[in-house]
Amino acid sequence: MAAGQGTRMRSRTPKVLHPICGRPMVHWPIHAAREAGAGTIVVVGSPDGTLAAHLPEGVAHVVQPTQDGTGGAVAATAGELPHDVPVVILSGDVPLMTADAIRALVDAHAVSGAAATMVTAILDDPTGYGRVVRAADGSVAEVVETRADGDATPAQLRIKEVNTGVFCFRADALLSALPRLGTANAQGERYLPDTLAILRADGHAVAAHLVEDPQLTLGVNDRVQLAQVTAVARRRILDGHMRAGVTVIDPGATAVDVSVAIGQDTVLEPGTILRGATVIGSDCRIGPQVTLTDCTLHDGVTIRHAFGTQAVAHDGVTVGPYAYLRPGAVLRDGAKVGTFVEIKNSEIGPGAKVPHLSYIGDADVGADSNLGAATITANYDGRRKHRTTIGKRVRSGVDVTFVAPVTVGDDAVTGAGSVITGDVPAGSLGVARARLRIIDDYAARQQADAPDGPGD
C-alpha cells in the first residue's frame, strides 16, 4: 500500500519515494517480498499515477481511485490478486520488514489455519498506532484506530500491542470481507483492520503474529521518522558487511548504500560515504572522509580524503588526500593520484603518478609516467573538448600546461614552466618558455633612481 498523501513530510516528493540508503522507500518492502518468494507483487498508488514510473520491473501498479483508507487501497488490487495463495499486505512507508520476517509470517499463518494473521508489536510508546484488542482465547478481536479523537476509548489507548500494518490473508476470505467494510469512524474511511472483525463474525479464526523486534515495523510519517528508519537501515547494512569480513572503524560515522558491494578485509575509516552502484574489492582502505558514488575499486586500493563519481581504480592504486575523481577517470594498476589532483575522463596508466596540484582532463597517460606538480591539460578551446596523449615513462616538469590536442611520445621530458602547444617526439625534451634574463645590480639601480634617493 503506497497511496497515502504523506502531507507530514512537507515535501513535493511523494513520501514513499524518499530515499533510504540509496533505495526509494517503497522499494524496500518490494525487495523484501521478492526475496521472500512472492510470485505477484502489486503496488497501490494514488490517482496521480506518480509511482508507476518508479517501480521495479515486473511489479504491477494499480490506482486507488479515492483516498478512502487502507481498506479501499487493498480493494483496488482485487483484480490482480491470485486466489490460491496467501496474500501478504505490506505498507510502503514501513520499509524495514525483511524477507525472513515475511516468511515467518506466512509460516505462522499456515500453521494457525486462520483466515487472517496480523503482525503485531509491543511498543513502549504506541502513540499513533492502531491498538490490538484480544479476545479471551488470545485471538484478535479487533483493531481500534487512533488517528482522531473518538476512534478509541481511554482503556483502548492504554494498550501497547499495536497493528503494524502487515497482514497475511487467505485470499478468498479477504475478497469476501472487503466489500463489507464500513466508514463508521472519525475519518470516514474504510480501514483494512476492520476486515478482522468481519471475518470473526463469519466464524473464521483471526491470528496474531507478534514480532520481537519492533524496529521491523517502524513507520515513516515525517522526516524525523525518516531519519530514525534510515539510521536502522544503515546499521543493518554495515552489520552485514562487517559479518562478511569488512572492518568499519566507526559505524556511526559511516554510510553505505544498500546497493554497494565490498570485499573482505577492506577497512572503512570514519567519514566514509559509499553510494549507488559502488563496488570495492578486497584489502582496500577507504577514508577517512571519502565519498564515492557509482565507483569501482579493485583490490588493494587506498583512498584518503577524496571525492569520486563514476571512476575506476585498479589494483594497488592510491588516491589522495584531497583528490577529485570525476566521471570517466580510470586509474590502472599501481597508479597514484595525489594531493589536490582532479582527474576527469582520463586514463592514468599502470604505475603512472600525478602527485600534486594538477588537473588532468580528457587525457591518456602512459605507464610509469610522472607528471610534476601543477600539470594541466588545457582540454577546452571554448567550443570543443580535445584530448591529450602522454606516452610511457614521460617526465613532465612542474607547472607544465599541455594545450590539447597534443601528443607526447614515450620517454619524453618537458621543462618546468612550459606551455606545450605541439607534439613532443619520443625521447625528446620539450621546453616552451621565455629565456631567463639577468639584470645585474637591479636593486641598487632602483634605489638610486628613486625621487628622494635611498631611504634612511
Image (spheres, rainbow, N blue to C red):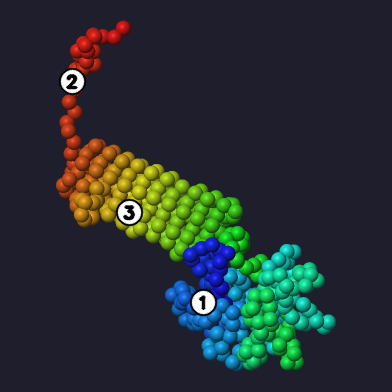
Visible residue check, residue 3: yes
* Disc 1 crowd, CA 10 A, few/some/many (<14, 14-19, 20+): many
Coordinates of residue 326 in the picture (x, y in percent)? 36, 55
Badge 1 or badge 3: first in the primary sequence = 1
Coordinates of residue 42 in the picture (x, y in percent)? 53, 82
Query: Type of residue at label 2?
Result: Ile
SS for tag 2?
Answer: loop
Badge 3 or badge 2: first in the primary sequence = 3
SS for tag 3?
Answer: strand
Residue position marked by numbered label 3 in the rendering: 344
Q: CA distance from mark 3 to mark 2?
A: 43 Å
The residue nearer to you, when weighing 195 against 98, is 195
Residue 445 horizontal side relative to residue 85, left or right: left
Q: CA distance from mark 1 to mark 2?
A: 81 Å
Residue at the far right in the pictured view: 136
Residue 286 vs 205, above or below: the answer is above
Q: Are marks 1 and 3 in contact (CB under 8 Å)?
A: no
Residue position marked by numbered label 1 in the rendering: 46
Coordinates of residue 453 in the picture (x, y in percent)? 23, 8
* Disc 2 crowd, CA 10 A, few/some/many (<14, 14-19, 20+): few
Residue position marked by numbered label 2 in the rendering: 439
Visible residue check, residue 239: no
* Disc 3 crowd, CA 10 A, few/some/many (<14, 14-19, 20+): many
Query: Type of residue at label 3?
Result: Lys
Residue 452 vs 151, above or below: the answer is above
Q: Is the N terminus in the top left, top right, bottom left or bottom right quadrant?
A: bottom right
- Residue occupying the point 53% across, 68% down: 15
Query: Type of residue at label 1?
Result: Ser
Residue 270 horizontal side relative to residue 448, left or right: right
